[in-house]
Amino acid sequence: MKDLFTKNRFSIFFVFIVLMGIMASCKKSSHEDLTTTPVTTTGVPTAGSRKQLTLDSIFLYAKQIYFWNDALPEYSAFNPRQFSGKSADLDNYDDELYKISQYSNNPTTNKPFEYSGEGNLYPKYSYINDKTQDNPDASASINSRASVDTEGNGFDIGIRPIFYLTSDSRENGSFVLLITAVYPGSSAAANGVQRGWQIQKINGNSISGISYSTENASIINSLDGASVKIEGVNYVDKVPFSVTLTKTSYKSSPVYTSKVITRAGKKIGYLAFARFSTLTNLSAPSDANLDPAFASFAAAGVTDLVVDLRYNGGGYINTAEYLANLIAPAGVAGKTMFTEIYNPTMQAKARTTKTILSNQPLLTSDGKIQRQEGKIVTYDDLDYTPAGNTTNFSKKGSLNSVTNVVFIVSASTASASELLINALKPYMNVQLVGRTTYGKPVGFFPITLENRYEVYMPLFETQNANKEGGYYTGMVPGTTVSDNSTYPFGDERESNLAAALNLIAPGSTSQSATSTVTERTRAASLNFTDMKPVNSEFNGMIENRTRIRK
C-alpha cells in the first residue's frame, strides 16, 4: 500500500476555468460565481461546449486532487471529451468518473475499485450529483425513492424496505419484502409501522414472491406513489397489519432508537444510528438528537455500549467526530482521533500557489461566501498537510466511564461509520458483530461544476492514532451474524443485538430477551441468500470542516 501512495509527486498544477453559468432549469445560485481570465494549460483546449468543458474539468480536478492522481495519464491520453455519446450530460459525466476510477487498484486485491449493482458496474468511491434533482419537494419523477439525506430531509412514505432473496438465483429468485427500518418523523413512523413487518400486499395487489426479476419494478413503482396502502404480517408473530401511508416532506432524527439494557448487573447503552447527519448546532457544537441519548446513558450509569451501525453509510466527518467524543472516556482528551492523508501533490502545495481549487468557493455552513482581506475564500486556501488535518479528542457529554463498545455492522456500514470505529480502537475495547463492512477509508468534499453538478471523488485516506487504515476490503467482525430484520431495533431477541450483549455479559439473559421456540423457529426458517435495497442511500464521508492555512 505504501508504494501506491508514495510515488513521484507532480510538480505541475493544473488551472482550468470552470463554467459557473446557470442553465435555465438549474437552481438559483446561493453565492456569487467565481470568474477568472482563461489560462492555457498545455495540451488542453481553451474553448468548447459547456459539456466538453465540464468533461475537461472533471479530469483536471482529478489530475490534481484525486487521492490516486499519480495513476492517471496525461490529458491527451485520457481524452475527456470522448465521453460525449449519451444524450444526458449526467450519464456522460458518470462514465468519465467511472473511467477515472479504473486507473487505480485496491491495494489489497489489486483490482479496480468498483462494485456491481443490477448488472452494472459503478465506481465504488466516486459519484456525481445533479443539484437540480435533489429537492425533496420536487416532482415524483425525481429520485423519489431516496431515503433521508445527510441534512435529515426525507420525502417518501418513511420505510426502508428490502427484497430478501430466498433462493440462490440472483435474477429470478423467490423473495420476501421486509421493512428493515422506519424513519423517525415520517408517515410510517406516525402510523406505527415497525421494523420486522413483511409486506404481502401493496394497494390491494398481492406479492407472490416467486420471482424478484418479474415483480421488483412494479413493487418499487407502487411504493413511489403519493399514497400507498401496505398490508402483511409481523414476520415473527404473524400479527396482521394494514396501513395507508402518504409521501410527505419531513425532518428525521438519525437516531432510530436508544435504550438502557441491564445484563448481569451491567448497564448497557444501546444506540441504533441511521446516518451521520449534520449536527443540529454546528457552532457549539451540540446535537439535539445524540445529546439526550447520551445524557440518559450517563444518568443510568452505563458502563458499556452497543452502537448499531448496520445500515449507516456515513455522512459528515464532524458528526462522526462528535459521536466519538461522546463515546470516548474522558482520559483521551487531547489525544489523536484520526488524520486525513491527502495525495503528495496536495500536501506539497505552497500557500502562495494558485491551483484549480481557486475556482471552488469555501462556503459557510449556511451557504454563504467567506472573505478574507477582501478576497473570496476558496478550497485553494486550505491546509492539506497531515499536521493540518489531524483531529484530537475533545470530550463531550457526561458519559465518562465506558471502556467497552460493540458495533453492529453489515455490508452497508461505510465511510464515517468505519472512521468512528477505527478512531476509537486505540483507546477502547472495540468489538464488531455482524457482517464485513463496506470498506471505505477514503473521504471527499464536493467539487461544484456549472453551479449544478457536485462531483465526489476520493481525496484523502483516514488513519487512526496508530496509523491504522486501509480497510479497503472492509472490517471483519470477530463475531459473524447475519442481519435479522424480523425484530425491532433494540429487541434483545434480535440475533445481532443478542450476540453483542453476549460479548459484554457472556451467558446472561434478561426477561425481555426470552422467546418461544416457535418464534426462534420462524425466524430461522427463512434462509436469506441476498438483499436488494429498494431505497437509494448515501454512502460516503464528507469533509465539512475548514482548516485554512495561516
Image (spheres, rainbow, N blue to C red):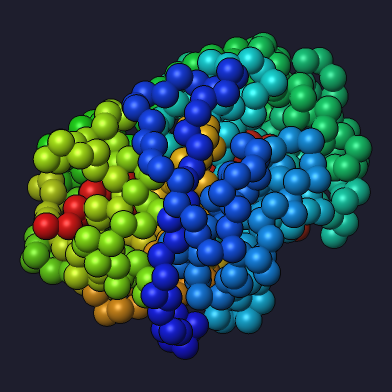
Residue 527 visible in image: no
Is residue 308 shown left or right of residue 467? right
x, y percentage for residue 367? 31, 29
Give the residue displayed 44% in from the left and 26% down from the top.
153
Residue 482: image quadrant is bottom right
- Number of marks present in the image shown: 0
x, y percentage for residue 356? 40, 54
Is residue 52 shown left or right of residue 372? right
x, y percentage for residue 511? 39, 46
> Is 525 situated above or below 452?
below
Residue 237: image quadrant is top right
Residue closer to the observer: 454 or 358? 358
Q: Given the current orientation, which residue lies at the most extreme bottom position?
A: 3
Give the residue displayed 29% in from the left and 67% down from the top.
349
Is residue 177 shown left or right of residue 24? right
Is residue 202 shown left or right of residue 283? right
Quadrant location of the C terminus? bottom left
Residue 350 visible in image: yes
Residue 524: image quadrant is bottom right
> Is 157 situated above or below 148?
above
Give the residue displayed 87% in from the left and 34% down from the top.
215
Give the residue displayed 45% in from the left and 52% down from the top.
39
